[in-house]
Every structure is written in structure tokens, then in C-alpha cells.
Image: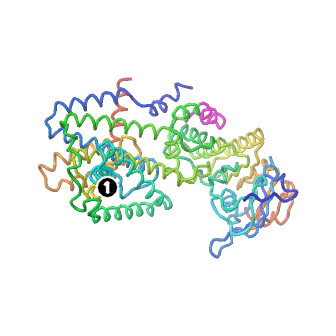
């Protein structure tokens, strides 16, 4: 089950080789290779349909790849279900924020801390009461104490995005996958969230892989950038290298104007 | 900070004054009422438990059961068969009833959680139809269409008032236990998985075993209700596992109001009240229930529970 990590790969937080995913005739991932070092902040960009979200879904276990391998901290992911992937320390957010909309913001966070404890059963209500304090602290981290008692359905889109991020943090992941963390947010909100994500990632030593359409945010936040197009990795490098890459300019950055 | 979150806190703990007041009121009503009214109260209590058990699935676990009468009825069959066919004493039958229901909840539930949404619901229906067919036709073991009777004296030979007290105690304990489950770590997991299985999975909680746990708990409590019902009438018939009892439960929960703990209780009270009162005056009283249900779904999906909480909030606002 656990294949011995290949020599020289033990250091990678995420190692992807030859990943292929097809939907019928459509090839969403066409042999993707990706290597992310521990504590690295990696952005994945590319035009719509490049396969970015499919990649995140395969990494999170929501989709099963047709071919290729994924290793997280040297541990090979096979056909694990999403909850098993989560237990390996992979946390993720979704393009459209995924929270519990009938529960209050605080109960969402309470659940996240409960889930972070690893157990799903138990009848001891006192255990939940003990989680209130860390849950409220978690809300403080993401700046959501003002709407703690509001039902998630009633809070703003941006607050839901924040909440989802905070909930994922509560499960103490080592590898964080964020699928468009700032999609649909206002400009100011976006900057705040990106800064929050970066400061938390740095503070906790997380490895961060994020898909983002906001190019300004990408170049400000990322240490390295992977450019995808048509299901392949098109280019990879530091922000300066990517900014200076004429082909990238043409297919992606230029294409946006 | 503590004061800020008081409202959230209050909804999580049991309001013992409310429980005690309800308990005392029902006890007094049982003793002051003529037998016919006491019978109605007993029936309401039993169905309040059954509908509350079903509500665990509908409101919290994200499942729909189109065959929940199976777990209700098998409680009564477990009781009857243990006593009448195996010749065991009554207490063994009382223990066996809910356990038989829980066992079938485990088996059928394990099948049903392999699917989701309407497909899972259809499978619950299929399991129920199979069970009904077996119960209906296996004459030697289940008594077939004539059921089993005479294995226990109706109401254990007690007066309606005192049998009502037994039911009141059992139902109160079971509903309090259900409250504990819903508001314990397990219940939080059930609610999370039920509302958003994709998010819960990404947090490390797989859907299937959590939903199975909810299914077994619901089947067990339905079985307690069915066992009580079997003792109440001193008999058991295939109808107890049949589709009409399933629909009764579903209507009660919808009437009571989805996504609220009290749905089964409110629904059982109103439905049985209409059943007992209107059936005397109007042959097609279920038509009225149908119309009311359509109105609830269209006008107030939160059902009676929504109405109650609105009124309670109003009153509290006036008091405070």
C-alpha cells in the first residue's frame, strides 16, 4: 500500500507524475507533472478549461485519475476516498465555497474542530463544549466573530469564503489546496484574504497550492507559479520568470486583454 | 464573548423546565381524561417517538426513508414472535422488539447508504416491500395476514391512565436520548454529513458509516415505538410494517417542519388530533390533511415548528 518513496523525493510535500484524467472524449489532464516543496507557496494559473480545478479535485480525492501517481509527503495516494485523503493532512477549499449553510457560523467552526479531532462518533456533549473556545479563537483568526451566531446562509459571500478557509485550517492540514480562494470577492476583501492565507501558511509552516484568476494576487503572493493550458503544465518558475516568459504572455496573460 | 454567544448555547441544552411541565401536564391529562381520550394521548406519544426517529433521518442525516414502518412494525413483531413463537417471557419480548428493528436497520441501512438521494430512498422502499411481503406470507412464523394476538394483554392489563404513564416515561427517555445524540459529537457529524457530504468528506468524515449509524439509531427508536404500539393493542398485523404507517410518519415530520428537532412531536399531535376529531365528522378527512400539507410546503416549509419558534420568539421578546 505505501510504496517506498523514490530516492530524492522524500523532501517533496507534493509530487505528481504523469497525471491523466479524461471525461469521456475530453482530456482534462493530459500528463501533469508537479513537484511542490514543503512550505512552498505555489500558484496554479491558466485559462478556463486548462484543468486546474480537475487537478485540485484529483489531489483531494474527489476525482480518481485515469493514470499517473500522486504522493503527499512521500505517501502514495491510490484510490483513497476524500475523507481518507483528508486524514493524510490534505485540506482543501472549493471553487464555490462549501460550508454548512443551515448551521450557524460558530457551529460550522465547532464542527471543523470536532472533525480535526479525527473521531466522528461519541455521545459526550462536554467534548463539544470544550471545543467552543478553540472554535471562537478560530473565528477570531479569520475575523468572523461578528457573525458567529448567524446562519451561514445569511452571511456574505466573502465571509463564507473566509469561513471555509478557517474550517479547513481547523483540521490542521499540512498541505493546503485552495481552488480560487478569492473568486467573486471585492478587491479589498481579496487582498485581505490573500494576506490572511499567507500569514497563516507561514506561521504554521503549511505547503500551499492555490488556483487563482486574480493575476495581481498571484504575482504578489506566490513563490512559484505553474501555468497550465489544455491539461498540461505549460510553464513553471518564479513570478519573475513567468512574467518574462513570452509564450505565457501570449497564451494567458495577453489573452486576457 | 460568552454573553455574545448565549443564544447559540441555549439552543444546545435541554430546557428541563419545559420537559418537566410537559411531563406533568400529560400525566395529569392521562388521569383526568375518559379512556377514549387517554387512548388518543397514548397514540400521540407513540407516534411522536416514531416520527421523531424518522425525523433524525429526514432533518439531520440527509436521508429519506420510504419504508420506515418496517422498523416500527418489526418492533411489534419482535415482541410478538419472541413471546408467542419462542415462548419467552414478556420482558424478553420487550427487549427483543427494538433490537430486531435495529438489526434490520443495520442490514437494510448498510445497503441503502451505498446509494444517495432518490436512489437510496427507492432502495428503502424496496426493502420495505420485501419485508411486508415476507411478513404477510410467512404464515407459520408471522401469522400472515391475521397477524399475532393474545401474546400480551392489551396495555399489559393496566388502566389507560397507568399504561399511559409507562408510555410517557419511555417516550420521554427516548426523545431526551435522541436530543442527546443530535447534540453530541455524533449528532454534529450526522448533521454535517447530512447537509454537505462533500465538505464533511474533505474534513475527514466519510458519509456511509455516519449515515448508517443514524439509520440504526432511527430504526432502534422506531422499534421502541412499535413495541409500545404492539403492547398497547396487544396484537400485531402486517399493516404495522405497511406503507400507510410509513406515510403517517412522513406526513407528521413534514407537517411538524423539517430541520427542527420537534418536528415529529408537533406533527404527531396535530395529525392524530385531526385523525381523531375529523374522522368523526368527515369521511374524507385525509383530503383535508393533504390540503394542509400542500399549504405547509408552499407557505411555511418550516411547518408547525417554524410557527412555534416564531411565536416563542415573539413572547420572549415581549417578556424581555
Question: Which residues are the magenta region?
Answer: A133-146
Horizontally, is B89 left or right of A226 in the view?
Answer: left
Residue at 44%, 33% (x, y): give it. B11
Is residue A137 located in the magenta-colored stretch of the structure? yes
Q: Report the quarter where the C terminus of chain A lies.
A: bottom right
Horizontally, is B117 left or right of A161 in the view?
Answer: left
Q: Chain ID for label 1?
A: B
Between B292 and B79, the residue placed more toward the observer is B79
Between B259 and B99, the residue placed more toward the observer is B99
- Please rate how many residues cluster around mark 1, counting C-alpha atoms within 10 Å: few if below 14, some from 14 to 19, many from 20: many
Is residue B146 located in the magenta-colored stretch of the structure? no
Horizontally, is B266 left or right of A185 in the view?
Answer: left
Q: Which residue is situated farthest in the front direction here?
A: B87
Q: Picture coordinates of residue B211 (x, y %)?
A: 49, 52
Q: Picture coordinates of residue B272 (x, y %)?
A: 23, 46
Q: Look at the image and tell me whether residue A257 can be seen.
A: no
| Relative height, residue B168 to residue A194 (above, below) | above
| Relative height, residue B133 to residue A101 (above, below) | below
Instruction: State whether the magenta stretch is mostly helix, strand or loop.
Output: helix
Q: Picture coordinates of residue A210 (x, y %)?
A: 72, 53
Q: Picture coordinates of residue A244 (x, y %)?
A: 87, 59
Residue at 66%, 49% (x, y): give it. A87
Secondary element at image label 1? helix
Q: Quadrant of residue A138?
A: top right
Disc 1: which residue? B246
Between A249 and B303, the residue placed more toward the observer is B303
Residue at 31%, 47% (x, y): give it. B88
Q: Quadrant of residue A133?
A: top right
Amino acid at each position: 500500500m505505501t510504496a517506498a518513496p523514490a530516492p530524492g523525493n522524500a523532501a517533496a510535500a507534493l509530487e505528481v507524475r504523469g497525471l491523466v484524467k479524461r471525461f469521456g472524449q475530453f482530456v482534462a489532464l493530459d500528463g501533469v507533472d508537479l513537484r511542490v516543496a514543503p512550505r512552498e507557496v505555489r500558484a496554479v494559473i491558466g485559462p478556463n478549461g486548462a484543468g486546474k480545478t480537475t487537478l485540485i479535485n484529483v489531489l483531494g480525492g474527489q476525482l480518481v485519475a485515469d493514470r499517473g501517481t500522486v504522493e503527499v509527503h512521500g505517501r502514495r495516494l491510490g484510490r483513497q476516498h476524500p475523507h481518507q485523503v483528508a486524514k493524510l493532512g490534505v485540506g482543501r477549499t472549493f471553487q464555490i465555497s462549501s460550508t454548512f449553510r443551515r448551521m450557524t457560523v460558530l457551529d460550522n467552526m465547532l464542527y471543523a474542530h470536532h472533525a480535526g479531532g479525527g473521531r466522528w462518533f461519541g455521545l459526550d456533549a462536554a467534548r463539544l463544549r470544550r471545543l467552543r473556545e478553540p472554535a471562537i479563537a478560530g473565528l477570531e483568526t479569520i475575523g468572523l466573530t461578528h457573525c458567529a451566531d448567524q446562519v451561514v446562509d445569511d452571511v456574505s459571500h466573502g465571509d463564507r469564503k473566509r469561513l471555509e478557509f478557517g474550517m479547513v485550517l481547523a483540521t490542521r492540514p499540512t498541505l493546503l489546496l485552495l481552488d480560487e480562494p478569492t473568486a467573486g470577492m471585492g478587491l479589498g476583501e481579496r487582498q485581505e484574504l490573500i494576506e490572511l492565507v499567507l500569514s497563516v501558511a507561514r506561521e504554521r509552516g503549511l505547503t500551499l497550492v492555490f488556483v487563482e484568476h486574480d493575476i495581481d494576487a498571484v504575482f504578489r503572493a506566490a513563490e512559484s507559479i505553474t501555468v497550465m493550458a489544455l491539461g498540461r503544465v505549460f510553464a513553471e518558475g518564479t513570478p519573475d520568470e513567468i512574467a518574462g516568459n513570452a509564450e505565457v504572455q501570449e497564451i494567458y496573460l495577453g489573452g486576457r486583454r | 464573548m460568552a454573553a455574545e454567544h448565549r443564544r447559540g448555547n441555549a439552543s444546545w441544552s435541554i430546557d428541563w423546565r419545559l420537559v418537566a411541565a410537559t411531563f406533568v401536564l400529560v400525566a395529569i391529562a392521562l388521569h383526568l381524561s375518559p379512556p377514549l381520550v387517554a387512548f388518543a394521548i397514548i397514540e400521540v406519544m407513540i407516534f411522536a417517538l416514531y416520527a421523531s426517529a424518522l425525523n433524525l433521518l429526514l432533518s439531520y442525516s440527509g436521508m429519506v426513508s420510504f419504508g420506515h414502518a418496517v422498523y416500527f412494525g418489526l418492533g411489534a413483531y419482535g415482541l410478538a414472535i419472541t413471546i408467542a413463537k419462542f415462548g419467552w417471557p414478556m420482558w424478553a419480548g420487550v427487549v427483543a422488539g427494538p433490537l430486531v428493528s435495529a438489526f434490520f436497520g443495520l442490514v437494510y441501512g448498510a445497503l441503502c447508504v451505498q446509494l444517495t438521494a432518490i436512489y437510496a430512498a427507492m432502495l428503502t422502499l424496496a426493502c420495505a416491500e420485501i419485508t411486508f411481503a415476507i411478513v404477510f406470507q410467512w404464515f407459520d412464523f408471522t401469522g400472515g395476514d391475521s397477524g399475532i394476538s393474545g401474546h400480551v394483554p392489551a396495555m399489559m392489563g393496566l388502566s389507560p391512565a397507568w399504561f399511559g404513564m409507562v408510555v410517557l416515561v419511555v417516550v420521554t427517555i427516548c426523545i431526551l436520548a435522541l436530543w442527546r445524540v443530535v447534540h453530541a459529537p455524533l449528532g454534529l457529524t450526522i448533521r454535517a454529513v447530512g447537509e454537505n457530504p462533500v465538505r464533511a468528506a474533505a474534513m475527514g468524515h466519510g458519509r456511509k458509516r455516519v449515515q448508517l449509524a443514524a439509520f440504526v439509531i432511527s430504526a432502534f427508536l422506531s422499534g421502541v415505538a412499535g413495541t409500545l404500539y404492539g403492547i398497547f393493542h396487544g396484537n400485531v398485523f402486517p399493516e404495522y410494517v405497511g406503507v400507510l404507517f410509513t406515510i403517517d410518519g412522513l406526513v407528521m415530520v413534514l407537517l411538524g417542519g423539517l430541520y427542527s428537532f420537534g418536528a415529529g412531536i408537533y406533527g404527531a399531535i396535530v395529525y392524530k388530533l385531526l385523525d381523531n376529531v375529523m374522522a368523526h365528522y368527515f369521511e374524507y378527512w385525509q383530503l383535508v390533511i393533504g390540503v394542509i400539507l400542500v399549504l405547509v410546503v408552499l407557505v411555511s416549509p418550516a411547518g408547525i415548528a417554524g410557527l412555534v419558534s416564531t411565536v416563542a420568539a415573539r413572547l420572549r421578546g415581549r417578556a424581555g
